Amino acid sequence: MAQKTALIVYAHQAPGSFNAAARDVAVQALAEQGYRVIVSDLYAMNFRASATQEDITGDLKNPELFQYGDETMHAWMEGRLSDDIVAEQRKVEEAELIIFQFPMYWFSVPAIMKGWIDRVLAQGFAFSLQKMYDNGIFKDKKAMLSFTTAATQTMFQPDGINGDINVTLWPLQNGTLHFCGFQVLAPQIFWSPAHCPLTVRTAMLEGWRARLRGLLMEKPLTFAPSGMFDLSFQGGFLLQPKVKEEQASQPYGITTGHHLGKPLPPDNQTKAQSANDNKSDCSN
Ligand SMILES: Cc1cc2nc3c(=O)[nH]c(=O)nc-3n(C[C@H](O)[C@H](O)[C@H](O)COP(=O)(O)OP(=O)(O)OC[C@H]3O[C@@H](n4cnc5c(N)ncnc54)[C@H](O)[C@@H]3O)c2cc1C
């Protein structure tokens, strides 16, 4: 049987960080399962975060008005993207599983990882209007976020100071990963490791190791199937009236984003329907 490949896109500056430890646990646990593990260590690579004309070689289609999305799509079709982008795209193609390992920055990923997303997941390579969400290009691949926070879990509860973590995760998990077709596994959240005692930090890493052993058997998170929508500009890409009718009697919205003005479905962006709770937090 062909060897499976996992890609870890990793963004932390310090080799002694908790993120580095989480990355190392993943490398080891996946290698033990026979995976070839590739790590893109973005800071060590000095990966460029900004999306500019330098990402394209050769003539621009429209030098008068530079449009990054159009130009990179044409460059991808014609093999004119810069070498650093092409190298990352090869890794994505080879990987069955992608783990993004990072410290939460401003409720999102660090800029260097956002740059990887902006530049590597180019139109044509990662998505098109015909191929998005559950018809997306990477629908046979799995992806997940694994990240640390300074905040405690309670701070990210619906009644906590930061608001609901499910809302925070929606743009990255739905708008990026699921948009490109990935089956999105539940996030691995290491709540506030810097404020936990060593025993709790060690338990978090052991919990991660245990989870990795069964990761590929996990069900992905639930998103609204594209078939629920009228996929045309004429129809506004809106929910089909029939689906709206069917949903009217449901107590919760369909997903965190498609809430239809109703209570959010609990844990929609943090737990797969039948997944175990793998989270630990020294604050509760
Ligand atoms: C620009 C910016 C924006 C931010 N925005 C947010 C935000 O929006 N929300 C939020 O919650 N936080 C935010 N933060 C905080 C940030 O998310 C945390 O500082 C980060 O997640 C902590 O992870 P770390 O890997 O850097 O921890 P570290 O400080 O590296 O590690 C924590 C502890 O774990 C120890 N450790 C390392 N290896 C191991 C090991 N093998 N076993 C046990 N212990 C180990 C370390 O020695 C340290 O004591 C932000 C930070 C910055 C700089």
Image (cartoon, rainbow, N blue to C red):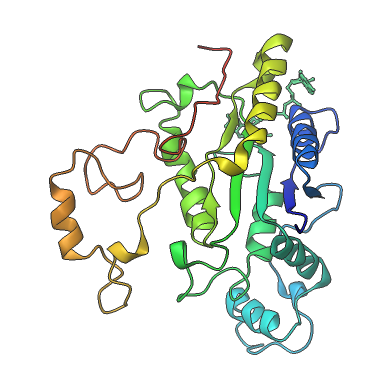
Residue that appears at 50% across and 56% down: 178
In this rendering, is residue 37 above or below 139? above
The quarter of the displayed image where residue 167 is located: top left
Image coords of residue 154 (percent x, y): 46, 20
Front-lying residue, 278 or 219: 219
Image coords of residue 259 (percent x, y): 28, 46
Image coords of residue 1 (percent x, y): 75, 57
Front-lying residue, 199 or 65: 199
> Is 57 positioned to the left or the right of 147 in the image?
right
Image coords of residue 195 (percent x, y): 65, 15
In this rendering, is residue 76 above or below 158? below
In this rendering, is residue 107 above or below 199? below
> Is 256 positioned to the left or the right of 155 in the image?
left
The quarter of the displayed image where residue 215 is located: top right
Residue that appears at 66% across and 27% down: 210
**Residue 108 visible in rendering:** no
**Residue 54 visible in rendering:** yes
Residue that appears at 34% across and 46% down: 255
Front-lying residue, 41 or 142: 142
Indicate the quadrant of ligand 1 in the picture: top right
How many circles with numbers are drawn on the protein?
Answer: 0
Residue that appears at 70% across and 82% down: 75
In this rendering, is residue 77 above or below 83? below
Front-lying residue, 15 or 213: 213
